[in-house]
Image (tube, rainbow, N blue to C red):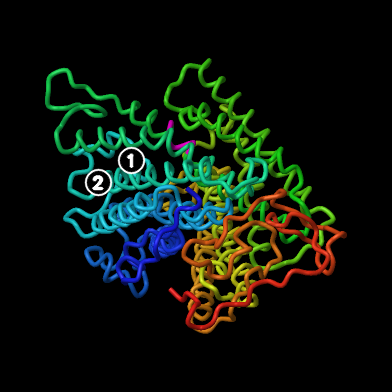
């Protein structure tokens, strides 16, 4: 399969729009994810405005978005905001931006393949994802508005009686289509990794980024059908009155709302690891590159990630301690939840081991990778309180859960995605981003982000419920109103800071410095190719002679690294390929 060459497309549609080239599809997924990240961020700021200034009109945009209530956010509008914010961020921003974009870009290049195993299926996966996004965005404009049952859509709240109108149905249809797209991509990822690795590329010579992306694909294959089945039954309950989760039209069709919760979290907890595993792998690779050291405990990290995949399939019940589980079953889920913290701790300690006494280069990608280490540490520590039954019952459905969840998944995956963008942007587009702007972006993201999520832990410990429309209506919560306003101010700074990133990308695409083949002096196979890579990546499929983190090599003249493609330490420094000319650089 490696030697099967495919002619490069020449027409605009086949080259840019309906391209089967994994590198073009990676850019399409990245654009889709960034667009929805912006939309989800705007919804988050509107949520924060309501919590900081309940009932007050939203400046500038309120009269256009909430004209029926004189520019203020109504209870129904608030419910729609947090429902769609959660849905968009998880399924339409983070997923395409990290898994879709960098799975497509990195897997073939890092394992030495010319493309994905199924290029047509790969192209189809993007367009089904795009169609899913169009359906979700369209639900804002139907009569009755978008979905309002929370991003988990528990029945009976998501039933036709409690939430009439087309918006909630379109929400379920959109996520079902997104699941179809995800399955297409996951099958492609796993097949490509198993079948198209370059000669000599054993599993323990694969970069940890590929390990993370491949293991996430395995979880997608196993658990996306579960949520797809739940969504299909929810759609049928809404449009055909079937009675899976709520009572239907037929006598005796008394639906079971808890069935949906079981199905949702059987998928939902592995989904946490589906999103974080690629970020873990990317961080593990980047820490090695910018510490100029081999990744500490490389095999242990790969085995720990594999162990987490197995354990993630049997811990979902810790999301349901308060629904009336039997005490024995609750204790079993609690024990398994505590057990999964062990391989997670192995990852964290291995990251510290990689950094320890390294020759650290604080490039922007490294800063965001270090940011992942911090925010994931915060998320992991706070997760212990929610994994134990006694403390979870008190903290359940409080702002503590919101802070923990955003530290664990939102912040960790966002920082992992930004680290990946700053690291592989030169390879994707043939241009260098401005490092000064990138460092400014990091600090104006990292500091406000912690001012947003850490105070939520304090509020939740003090008893503030999540999804609360008007906290000032409760006397015992009035004390937290200055904290809510601080969080909202920090969230605004965090949102505005992303304009630095947007400007940096636009500036670099237009007039950025040409990228050399290997600007970071990294050792994995993608850096053997020019920036950007040609149509089929490699003129000749390289042989792999060593692992992915061969840094700190005193036997290599004038440099401290040796590439996976090099059979022995060279006697003279290698001359990397020249940067592409203006006509060859990719600027889209």
For the point 33% across and 43% down, the residue is 180
Q: Are marks 2 and 1 in contact (CB under 8 Å)?
A: yes
> Taking 184 as reference, is 191 left or right?
right
Q: Position of residue 325 (x, y in %)?
A: 45, 20
Considering only order in the chain, which callout, 1 or 2, is on the residue closer to the N terminus?
1
Task: Tell me how many marks there are.
Answer: 2
Q: CA distance from mark 2 to mark 1?
A: 9 Å
Residue visible at 72% across and 43% down in the picture: 298
Verify whether residue 267 appears in magenta.
yes
Q: Quadrant of residue 426?
A: bottom right
Which residue occupies the foreground of this view, 23 or 260?
23
Q: Quadrant of residue 384?
A: top right
Q: Is residue 382 magenta?
A: no
Span of residues in magenta: 266-270
In the picture of the structure, the residue carrying the numbered disc 1 is: 153
Query: Which element carries disc 1, helix, strand or loop?
Result: loop
Which disc, if any, is residue 168?
A: 2
Task: Using the image as rendered, state which of residue 233 and residue 446 is in the foreground.
Answer: 233
Taking the view exactly as shown, the residue that stands out farthest to the right is: 554
Q: Is residue 140 above or below residue 576?
A: above
User: In the rendered view, does 64 fall on the left or right side of 9?
Assistant: left
């Amino acid at each position: 399969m490696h030697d099967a060459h495919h002619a490069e497309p020449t027409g605009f549609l086949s080259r840019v729009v309906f391209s089967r080239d994994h590198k073009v599809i990676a850019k399409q997924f990245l654009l889709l994810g960034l667009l929805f990240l912006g939309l989800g961020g705007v919804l988050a700021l509107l949520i924060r405005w309501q919590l900081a200034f309940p009932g007050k009109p939203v400046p500038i945009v309120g009269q256009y978005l909430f004209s029926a209530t004189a520019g203020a956010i109504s209870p129904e509008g608030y419910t729609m905001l947090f429902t769609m914010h959660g849905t968009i961020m998880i399924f339409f921003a983070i997923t395409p931006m990290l898994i879709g974009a960098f799975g497509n870009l990195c897997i073939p290049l890092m394992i030495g393949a010319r493309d994905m195993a199924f290029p047509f299926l790969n192209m189809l996966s993007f367009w089904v994802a795009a169609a899913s996004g169009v359906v979700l965005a369209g639900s804002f404009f139907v009569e009755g508005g978008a979905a309002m049952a929370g991003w988990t859509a528990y029945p009976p709240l998501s039933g036709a009686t409690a939430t009439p109108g087309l918006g909630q149905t379109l929400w379920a249809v959109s996520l079902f289509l997104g699941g179809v797209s995800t399955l297409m991509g996951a099958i492609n990822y796993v097949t490509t990794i198993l079948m198209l690795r370059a000669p000599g590329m054993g599993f323990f010579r694969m970069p940890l980024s590929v390990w993370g992306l491949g293991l996430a694909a395995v979880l997608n294959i196993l658990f996306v059908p579960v949520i797809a089945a739940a969504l299909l039954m929810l759609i049928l309950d809404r449009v055909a009155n079937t009675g899976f989760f709520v009572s239907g039209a037929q006598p005796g069709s008394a639906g079971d709302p808890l069935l949906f919760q079981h199905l949702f979290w059987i998928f939902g907890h592995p989904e946490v690891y589906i999103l974080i595993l690629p970020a873990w792998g990317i961080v593990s690779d980047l820490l090695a590159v910018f510490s100029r050291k081999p990744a500490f405990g490389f095999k242990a990290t790969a085995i720990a990630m594999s162990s987490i995949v197995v354990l993630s399939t049997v811990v979902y019940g810790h999301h349901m301690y308060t629904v009336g589980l039997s005490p024995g079953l609750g204790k079993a889920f609690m024990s398994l939840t505590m057990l999964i913290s062990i391989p997670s701790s192995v990852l964290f300690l291995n990251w510290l081991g990689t950094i320890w006494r390294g020759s650290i280069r604080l490039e922007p990608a490294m800063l965001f990778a270090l940011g992942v280490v911090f925010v994931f540490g915060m998320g992991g520590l706070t997760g212990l309180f929610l994994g134990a039954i006694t403390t979870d019952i008190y903290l359940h459905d409080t702002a503590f859960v919101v802070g923990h969840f955003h530290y664990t998944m939102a912040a960790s995956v966002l920082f992992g995605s930004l680290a990946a963008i700053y690291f592989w942007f030169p390879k994707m587009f043939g241009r260098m981003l401005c490092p000064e702007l990138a460092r400014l972006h990091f600090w104006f993201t990292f500091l406000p982000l912690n001012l947003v999520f850490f105070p939520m832990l304090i509020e939740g410990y003090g008893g503030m419920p999540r999804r609360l429309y008007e906290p000032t209506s409760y006397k015992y919560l009035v004390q937290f109103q200055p904290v809510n306003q601080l969080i909202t101010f920090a969230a605004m700074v965090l949102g505005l800071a992303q304009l630095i990133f947007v400007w940096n990308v636009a500036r670099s695409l237009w007039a950025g410095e040409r990228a050399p083949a290997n600007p970071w002096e990294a050792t994995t196979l993608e850096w053997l190719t020019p920036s950007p890579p040609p149509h089929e990546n490699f003129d000749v499929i390289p042989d792999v002679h060593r692992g992915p983190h061969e840094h700190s090599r005193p036997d290599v003249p004038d440099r401290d690294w040796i590439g996976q493609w090099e059979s022995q330490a060279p006697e003279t420094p290698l001359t990397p390929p020249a940067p592409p000319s203006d006509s060859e650089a990719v600027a889209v």
